[in-house]
Image (cartoon, coloured by chain):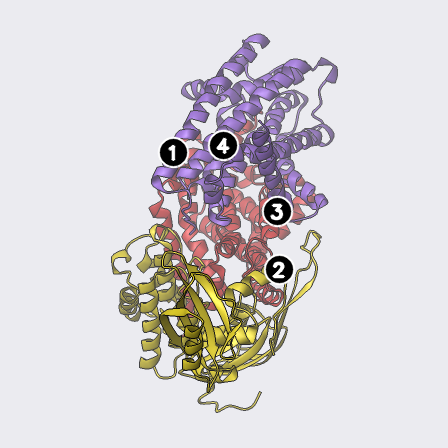
Chain colours: A yellow, B red, C purple
Amino acid sequence: MAPDDPLNPPAVEVRGLTRTFRAGPTFGGCPGGGEVSALGGVNVRIERGEIFGLLGPNGAGKTTLIKILTTLLFPTAGEARVAGYDVVRDANEVRKRIGLVSGGESSGYGILTVRECLWMFSQFYGVPGKVAGPRIDLLIETAGLSEQARTRINRLSTGQRQRMNFARGFVSDPDVVFLDEPTLGMDVNAARAMRQYVARWVRERPGRTVLLTTHYMREAEELCDRIAIIDHGHLLACDSFAGLRRLVESGQHVELEVRAADGGTPVLPSLAGVPIVWGAPHPERGTRALKFRLPPGGSLADVLRELEARGVRIEAIATRETSLEDVFVALVGRGLEESDEREDDGAGPVGAP
Amino acid sequence: MSTVALNLRATWGRTYGRLVGSFREPTWLITDAILPNLGMLAFVMLYRALGAPRSFETLAVVGGLLATYWINVLWGMGAQFYWEKQSGQLQLYFVAPCSRMAILSGMALGGFLLTTARSAFGLFLGFVVVGVRVEPFSLPALLGVFALTMIALYALGMVMASLFLLWGREAYHLSNALYQPVQFLSGLYFPLKTLGPLGIVSAGLVPLGLGVDALRQVLLGAGAHALMPLRFEVALLVGLCAFFLWLARVALAHLESLAKREGRLTQRWQ
Amino acid sequence: MRPLVSRLRASAWLGLQIESNWTDPFLFTAYAITHPLATALILAGMYWAVGGTAQGADTFRGLYLGSAFHNYVVMVLAGMGWMIVEEREEFETLKYVYTSPIGMFNYLAGRSLVKLALATLSTVLTLAVGWFLVGLRWDWGAVHWLPLVAALGLGVVATVSLGFFVAGFALVMPRAAFTLNDGIAVALYLLCGVIFPVDLLPRVLQWVALALPFTWWYEALRRFLLGHGSSTLLNAWSEGALMGWLFATTLVFSVAAHLAYLALERRARQLGRLDQTTLF
């Protein structure tokens, strides 16, 4: 690896990271077989103070990467450092400086209360009692669990458990926090509060870093300074949101709600040279959605004029810029939901660089 | 914060979780403390049915008391990593900077309360209800032998816990399979001498048998039908303590490393 | 009828997979016999330790037999209670089974079939160890086969009924279920004349023992296999009376256990315990 400033190493640095899994036989000789490549030579560098997003469909390698960085898994090849320490050779130094929140996992023992569980985990990080108490109080309040502080975990709802799990990840006040789908199961308000907390936490603590994986594009757009897109164990792109948008064809996305004069759907593959897609009909209003991407320099007025000339009346119009989802689809070749379905079918990415 | 302080805090944190859990589900008093002792009572009654000397009943009671600790070692510590893994908690321990032995010690200490309650009830059953008797004995000797046995046994439990890092149900079934055979090979309910050469071999492998035999000698003298003189058994126990503590440290580190290499550390439902 | 059979078959298949698919058949068989073998050897060790006289052999034979058949109680009881613990805490599938049309009762019944099969294997092996290793033998020509098979059937019914009761408790008392299963098996070990005659129990406990079908069961098995029981108290009853009491206590016990299971299942639902984890 290139020499870093030893006094100010990056939060995370990964070079040629590879991980394959072998589904081998158990000790009783039960048959298994096959080798799966979860990461195929990933390179990434995350500076201190960043909120870094990692996007990808299920099975892309996000969690495998996080497990390696949090010392839960050895890489097959390559190197990884967290806060300047090698995750294999200096695992214990890494653990002193990190926190981990995994969405959808249970955290803590059902029989303990929220406060007790947070306190117990604070002790695993050696947080002194005088420090742990106020910190836990603040985290409980931030997580919106003040009324549930003395409630047993097995009586919390899914969202409340996840909020407690979230709070647990910060109880040691780590240098680097790994958030693996942290808002899974949370309601809108709770998820928003968590995002606000993360942004404030990084802002108020210079040098603290967050690595976030998520399926919620909005979350990544809102929070992350930079975003990496990963698929089938390979990093497809890594840049700020603005930078990623520049990688793909930009232009305005337009969605119209239209009504044909005769009530039907005109057969129109394009309008003013712009390819269009008919969306869902709205039978109760007698309208239909019409979507297209206006290329740079294209004229919206020309498109609207042609529609009127064909007797199509425009009921509503909405425009938006290229979203992260558009970038994702362009790079991965499919949307997140479609990616998940295709994973089940075993199909590969289309159009990925 | 120093490593020692960190690990002590971690041990206390884990002990607390287990203690609190025990008190919050008080049904354990019946299911964990009272009912299991009835098996010991049944063996005492078998000796009566066979017309055995009264000292054999004391042998069975002492064995039954130690059996409760063996259960705690196997299930309260050895298999605990299995449950942590299955519930998705294990990774949270392995991401924390405290040592694995600190966590396991916390589990053991927390389970000790349960085990001691069970033993206390066993003592009551044996000495008050059944009326077994002992010879005059030295309390320091008794406590010393007991402490050595516990250290060696719980260190063995840590070695077993390390197996669960790599395996899942295989290790669970291994623990299950060991439960009764170790009781037989340790002569928990009969003098270890009965097994002849097999008894000598097993005494060198599993601290439970050696510990039971030594405790019986302290309590019954010649009536213990011991395998070897007490001083030899104590020396062997000291050796086993050192060996298993070292092995536990090595096994935990090695198997953790192996599990991470194979990606099994956080694999549920193996 | 056909849906019931297919559900039982599916749950039995699942039970077999869970029991066995962690290793190969050879290791699985070795594992299955370890526990009963070790229990048998503990008893043998106790017998050898007190000198093992011929007179003692006769007494010991009967008690060993009781221990062999007690494998049914241990494995079915522990198994059915443990099933609930596993499904809820480990696999977290109990709620899905409960909310499916199979019904918890049918599901447990199907899963218990595998336990019964394993218990039969364990019992046979324990008897074999006694025969070949310890020298505890009997005259096959003197065995009363028909009543023996009938007694065995009744005992299995009582055992499975108790298993349902234990499973019901496991639904309501999540944490306690870990050890309750074994605890009840041990309590029966003490109370039902498994390894010592019920005559040695205090009078009050003798009444408790006589109310349990298992006491009559072990005595009936000894009577029909060996030609005599191990209890002076129960030797006073004729074979017909013995079977009569076995049948009556099994009937009452099974009905009571079934009703108790239904009540406990309802209670678990009221308390919201069906998907509650409590591991600590």
Report how far apart the C-alphas of labels 4 and 3 lie in the structure: 55 Å
> What crowding class fits label 3: few (fewer than 14 Cα within 10 Å), some (14-19), or many (20 or more)?
some
Q: Residue at x 43, y 18 (%)?
A: C207
Q: Position of residue A217 (x, y in %)?
A: 43, 71
User: Which residue is labeled 1 in the image?
Assistant: C266
Within 10 angstroms of label 2, few (less than 14), some, or many (20 or more) residues?
Answer: few
For the residues tagged 4 and 3, is the chain the same? no
Q: Circle 4 sits on which residue?
A: C105
Q: How crowded is mark 4: few (under 14 residues within 10 Å), some or many (20 or more)?
A: some
Q: Which mark is residue B228?
A: 3
Whether A193 is drawn above or below C14: the answer is below
Q: Are marks 2 and 1 in contact (CB under 8 Å)?
A: no
Q: Where is residue A187 in the image (x, y as percent from the top left)?
A: 34, 61
Q: Which of marks 4 and 3 is in front?
A: 4
Disc 1 and disc 3: Cα gap in Å? 57 Å
Q: Name the kind of residue labelled 4 in the image.
A: Phe
- Residue B179 in the image: state x and y as whole percent: 57, 44
> Which mark lies nearer to you, 2 or 1?
2
- Three-letter amino acid code at the position of disc 1: Arg
Element assignment for label 1:
helix
Between disc 2 and disc 3, the foreground one is 2
Of residue C227 and residue C182, the one placed in the foreground of this image is C182
Please name the residue shown 49% across and 79% down the image: A272
In the displayed structure image, the side of residue C24 where residue C19 appears, left or right? left
Viewer-proximal residue among C204 and C278: C278
Is the residue at mark 2 from the same chain as the one at mark 3?
A: no
Closer-to-camera residue (A330/C138): A330
Query: The residue under label 2 is which amino acid type?
Result: Asp
